[in-house]
Image: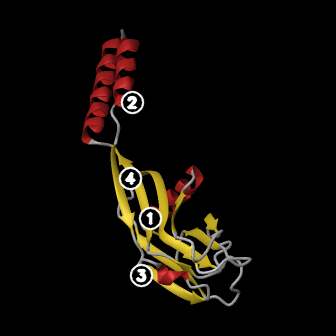
Amino acid sequence: MKKIVTLLVVLAFSAVPGVASVYYFHPNPADLSDLDHYRYFSWGFEWQNPDDKITSISMTFKNIQDYTVEPDDILYINLLDTPPGLGVHAYYDYREIGNAWEGEGPLIGTWSDPLGYPNPPIDLTFNFTEEQVGYFSDFIADGFVGFGFDADCHYFNDGVELRVETAVPEPLTIGLFGLGLVGMGILRRKKH
């Protein structure tokens, strides 16, 4: 009987999902100055929900397009644990080719526009891997996180959006957990 009660409590916990929340973040300027290839950028922001469990992250560039296709035209995006500051900051790119943020944090992804202007722009989305979500979760522990962008060409775009989905335990789940603990305590007392 005790094993059945314990099994029912475990099943009750697993049957009640957490509440999902979705957070959206946008840099200012939203298009990161169209990612001028003579510059590289950082974008730092605060994270206000340290207890939320992050389940997925994606970053979308709206209507992105390279003005022309050339060799070494690559957009690099890195996750930064300690970006240089809050908001968007631009730095002169003396190297122009290669990732200015290399070694500063995990690479989220790269992209090269295979068509360029005058072909239509696209919406480009980077869906974070489980490992990248883990890095992000670790980095937000101090409430501060950011990204580094280095475009080795001029990537026109209509804005960048970061989407973070989280799950937090809902009150019903917490209540069931408490009832389960009380029930297990009663069973333990009856045994002794």
Whether label 1 touches label 2, CB < 8 Å? no
* Helix, strand or loop status at disc 2: helix
Q: Which mark is residue 29?
A: 3
Badge 2 amino acid? Ser
Q: Which residue is mark 1?
A: 162
Q: Which residue is located at x 59 percent, y 53 percent?
A: 131
Q: How dense is the environment of label 4, judged by Cα within 10 Å: few (below 14), some, or many (20 and up)?
A: some
Q: CA distance from mark 4 to mark 3?
A: 28 Å
In the picture, which quadrant includes the C terminus? top left
Image depth: mark 2 or mark 3 in front: 3
Q: How dense is the environment of label 3, judged by Cα within 10 Å: few (below 14), some, or many (20 and up)?
A: few
The image shows residue 159, relative to residue 140, as above or below, that is below
Give the percent coordinates (x, y) of residue 141. 46, 61
Q: Which residue is mark 2?
A: 14
Mark closer to the chain start, 2 or 4: 2
Q: Which residue is located at x 63 percent, y 67 percent?
A: 111
Mark closer to the chain start, 4 or 3: 3
Residue 171 located left or right of residue 128: left
Mark closer to the chain start, 1 or 3: 3
